[in-house]
Amino acid sequence: MKVTPPKWADKFLAWYCNPELLEEIQGDVYELFEKRLEQNTARAKRLFVWDVIRFFRWSTIKRTTTQNNYLNNTIMLGNYFKTGYRNLLKDKVTTTISVLGLSLAVGCAITTFFCIDYFIGMDAFHLNKERIYQVINVVNDNGHHQKYSDVPITLESKLRDIADVEKVTRIEYGNGNMRYEDNVFSEFIHFVDPDFKEIFSFPTKQMEPDALSEKSKIIISDRIAQKYFGQTNPIGKQVSIKFKDDKILAFQIGGVLDKTPPRHSFNPNVIISIDVFKELRPEEYESLSYDTDAIFVMVHDGAGPTAANDILKATVEEQNNVQANKKVISSSLLSYNHVLDINYEIVGSIMGGGHPAGRIALGVTSILLLLLACSNYINISVSSASKRLKEIAMRKVLGGSRGMIMRQFIIENILVCLIAVIIGTFLSYFFLLPGFNMAMPVEIPFSSYNMLNNVLLYAGLLIGLGLLSGLYPALFISKFQPISIFRGSQKFGRKSWLSRILLTFQFVIAFFTIVGSFVFTDASLQLANADWGYTPNDIISTPTVKNSTSEALYNKIVSNSSVQQAAKSFGHIGPYNPLISARYGETTVQTNSYEIDHNYVDVMGLEILEGRPFNEKGDYQKIIINEKLVRKMGWDAPLREHLVIDSTRYDVIGVVKDVVISDYYGGMSPMLFKPLHDKEPNYITFKTQENASMKAMSDLKGYWKELAPDDPFDGFYQAKIMDSFFDENQMNMLIISFLAVVTLIIASIGLYGLVAYNISRRMKEFSIRKVLGANLFYIIKLINKEYMWLLVVALIIGAPFGVYMMNQLIASVYPDTTQMTAYPVIVAILIIMLSFIITVARQVYKVGKANPVNNLRGD
């Protein structure tokens, strides 16, 4: 049997190839096919297909146009732009409505894109980002698998011996008071291995080769350099740092980091060799039971995490043997990008960035705004096409094809979209993004981390909007027949299914977005006025210094006439919340732990629900727990229960009401309170007399200057510990409310344009009805009846969906918020209905005031 080439490839060649060249090209590929058959049949067929594809070039494809036709098409293209431009100027109302709606949507979309892009491009400046991994432990937290950034500090040595691993660094957090001459400030410190400089590509201003290799040399950020040294070159300068145990060490500045790019997940200010940490805390440095804040590895180019994961897996049993209160399920490497994506799920993550729900909601809302603006444009374009019926018919009579008519309308639409993109860019650059940055804790640039993304954004907006909003009107309008138009028998389907669907879709988006925003606003306002579990007013707290100074400071505070009562603690609700593991039988639970004296409960105003607070002495093996921990343990009678902490049994003597630590993200946290026995306190907290907190704070600063002149003062009002959360919550509320207003504006102007056009088209009908005796109420009914039932359908679909989706979003971010009420939904619906009524009412008023004689004079 004779072997032939693939038939589909042969047909494809005949379809695209210029007939004048087909015989020659077909002969060549057939000849090559016959030669290759002698070697291998399958290979000959594959190469035949490749040859057919290879000949698919501009010079060989079939074209029906001559050079003259090409010139004509070029001239026609210019004519399309001129005609489109004139039509836009001619119909100013329709153009303004379309451009305004699209511009608002585009401006919001561009702003949202750069916001989301900011987080997607996080840490893109790290050159080896794709090769960086972090060690993550998964711990059994009372049946819940919880990811932890904190892992045993000694894992570093095991990872360094793996062939696939090139670099390893630990990151250990610390604090210290740094001094240069008379400048003394409390600074947050990163203790790291020398490989830190190779793994992470933080930009540098100056860097000595042995910085971090020499433990006496430290690296500081540009901000710290300006803070301490001003314009002086800091390299080689000597500073001293006093650490928590009052040990003072001298360091030389060995490097200065340049300003970190805006898209960063963490930004170290003072970087010190981890050998210094070893010197400060040698026992913990060598202990498998001590967890460091993070361990990162960089694998060799082309290698993966498999070998390291095998080693880490083998350490799980060893970790569990030395950490009885912590049940590790798995230990493995997660890629840097993946850790960035799920950092909100990782306890103790060193990377910034919150829950993605807000960004998802922002993105979805922006897409809905674009769809809303496009549906507006489609409806108005199709409805207003009746003004141009004779133009369309004349073009067809003079030889214009349907394709030419389509191109005409698509080009007009692209012009509208181009104007909208330009205005939207202007709005985003000068108003929306600056406003967004004022509300955000980060500075989002008006650019993507990847320049290609900028090109794709604008190309996608222009092409996507052009096709999405212009393709159907072009297809619909271009199908009209000239003979029907000239006879006057061409009918426009003002009640067509597509028009109804698009209008309903607009209303659904409006109800969904606005009702959802009111639900979110209501939840935010509830959070702003929610009970913290205690009354923070008139409470002041301050970190302590060394023991003798701490005691002297405490004595001065309790003797102040403005102070009602004072308490000492190790850990404090808000700024310092130590996390420990506790056991109950075979169950392990992670909980915040505070060691407090007998006054702390009263000073903080914690509400005892069951049991009692601590006595001044004697309750050394007792604990007080909160409601969340009771629920987590599943206890019905908590006062009969106990927990084991570091092999010591603690009996529960009291249950306090749940309190908010520093925000509502993730819900309430489990807490326990132990007596402050033989541990040195690190916080003093006191309750002032009513309206005396400002005087008490002033006195506290004076005491501090007297007793600890070399240490920075860090006292604070307890009522301000939630300020950053409330600021962020206020920002979210403003953004969502703004998007809701934009949605309402776009929907209203779309409805306005559609109603205005339909009324102008039916003015003669309404005039005749008025002459025949119809009153204004009847005319209003005629105008509104085709919109009202669509509005009701949209209300039934959009409002419940908006409530459900926003409640899901709120529950994922704020699990312990109170349930919503019907009030925000009712208010949102009334506002939407009122806006739509006002939009239609203005047009109805014009009908009522119009003189029928003027409209019928020409008939």
Image: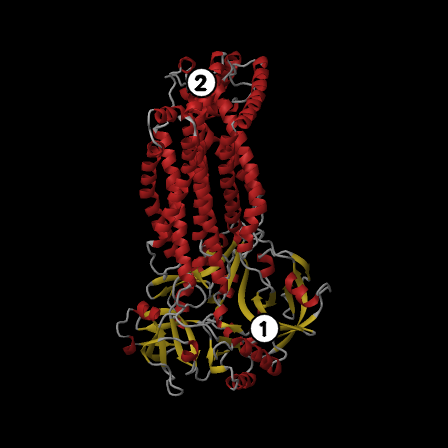
Q: Residue at x 38, y 53 (%)?
A: 519
Q: Residue at x 39, y 18 (%)?
A: 490
- Secondary structure of residue under mark 2: loop
Q: Residue at x 71, y 67 (%)?
A: 236
Please tell me how many numbered marks the rendered image carries.
2
Q: Within 10 angstroms of label 2, few (less than 14), some, or many (20 or more) residues? A: few
Locate residue 73 relative to residue 364 in the image: left or right. right
Identify which amino acid the numbered label 1 is placed on.
Gly
Which dot marks residue 469? none
- Secondary structure of residue under mark 1: strand
Look at the numbered discs 1 and 2 and tell me whether their residues touch, using CB distance below 8 Å.
Answer: no
Q: Earlier in the sequence, mark 1 or mark 2?
A: 1
Locate residue 308 relative to residue 648 in the image: left or right. right
In the figure, residue 548 lies in which quadrant? Answer: bottom right
User: Percent from the top left, x then y, of residue 770?
Assistant: 36, 27
Query: In the rendered view of the protein, which quadrant contains the N terminus?
Result: top left
Which dot marks residue 858? 2
Instruction: Look at the image and name its color scheme.
Output: secondary structure
Identify which residue, 98 or 206, lies in the foreground.
Answer: 98
Identify which residue, 697 or 63, lies in the foreground.
Answer: 697
User: Percent from the top left, x then y, of residue 830?
Assistant: 37, 47
Identify which residue, 558 or 642, lies in the foreground.
Answer: 558
In the figure, residue 77 lies in which quadrant? Answer: top right
Circle 1 or circle 2, nearest the eye = 2
In the figure, residue 793 lies in which quadrant? Answer: top left
User: Percent from the top left, x then y, of residue 454?
Assistant: 56, 41
Identify which amino acid the numbered label 2 is placed on.
Gly
Residue 218 visible? The answer is yes
User: Percent from the top left, x then y, of residue 563?
Assistant: 49, 82
Q: Within 10 angstroms of label 1, few (less than 14), some, or many (20 or more) residues? A: many
Residue 40 visible? The answer is no
Tag 1 residue: 176
